[in-house]
Image: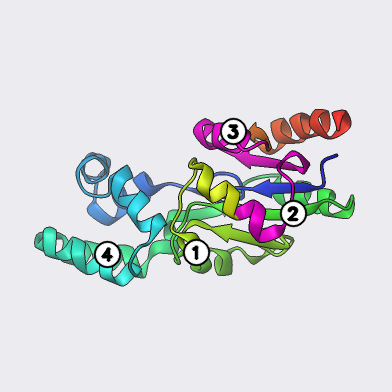
Amino acid sequence: MIKNIVFDFGGVLVEYSFRNFFAKMLGSEEKADWFLANVFTEEMNSKLDKQMKSVEEYIEEWKATWPELSDKFDYFNANYTDVFTAEVPGMLDLILQLKAQGYRLLGLSNWSTKVHEVMDKFPAIFQPLEGYLISYMVHQLKPSPDIFHSFLNKFEVKPEECVFIDDKPENIEGAKRVGMHGIVFENAEQLAEELRKILAAS
């Protein structure tokens, strides 16, 4: 029986675009694409989310590597929440419905300590969550089984009693490998329909 609904944060609860943010920061979409391909890569973002050192230490490391971009890294650090633009439409209503139905709402996200700035920016969408595990807390990243096991242990929940919702298919595959149910998120309407089927079957 499903008792716990578990949400990824970025792309599920809040909308974001690094490309749009960097286009504004650098002055063009072309420069933003170059920055994402050569500087703020997936590997760099993953290091930030795993956070083996402080965000400030990473910023200083990047500034040493790309001194010509020092002011841009400072801008990124100071204006980070501008990457995140709005609640995902329909999600607040849906999670409030699920909470009213008695489901335990939890979070599991790859993110650095900067997550708390975003949670402060959008308090309504995060407030209904009973708790959460963020990658920086355990220095583990989805889709590795390690972080899912850390999540299950932290909240003392059984995998078969959890539905995990994430916008990245590889993270849903990671959840399923440890025995959780999973839904690849597209939008609130699609999620509500897929959740309805899973919850009815349980």
Closer to the camera in the image, 111 or 83: 111
Picture quadrant where residue 34 is located: top left
Which amino acid, by three-letter code, is at mark 1? Answer: Met
Kindly state the secondary structure of the residue where label 4 is placed.
Answer: helix
Kindly state the secondary structure of the residue where label 2 is placed.
Answer: strand
Query: Between disc 3 and disc 1, whose residue precedes?
Result: 1
Locate the C terminus and report the quarter of the image it occupies. top right
Which amino acid, by three-letter code, is at mark 4? Answer: Tyr
Q: Which residue is mark 4?
A: 58
Which of discs 2 and 1 lies nearer the camera? The answer is: 1
Whole-number angstrom distance, CA of label 2 to CA of label 3: 21 Å
Q: Which residue is mark 1?
A: 137
Closer to the camera in the image, 120 or 169: 169
Q: Which residue is mark 3?
A: 177
Which of discs 4 and 1 lies nearer the camera? The answer is: 1
Q: Is residue 87 visible?
A: no
Closer to the camera in the image, 1 or 121: 1
Query: Between disc 3 and disc 4, whose residue precedes?
Result: 4
Image marks 4 and 2: residues in contact by CB distance under 8 Å: no
Q: What's the mark number on residue 105?
A: 2
Query: Between disc 4 and disc 2, whose residue precedes?
Result: 4
Q: Which residues are magenta?
A: 151-179
Whole-number angstrom distance, CA of label 2 to CA of label 1: 19 Å
Locate the N terminus and report the quarter of the image it occupies. top right
Residue 154, image x, y percentages? 65, 60
Q: Is residue 118 above or below residue 46?
A: below
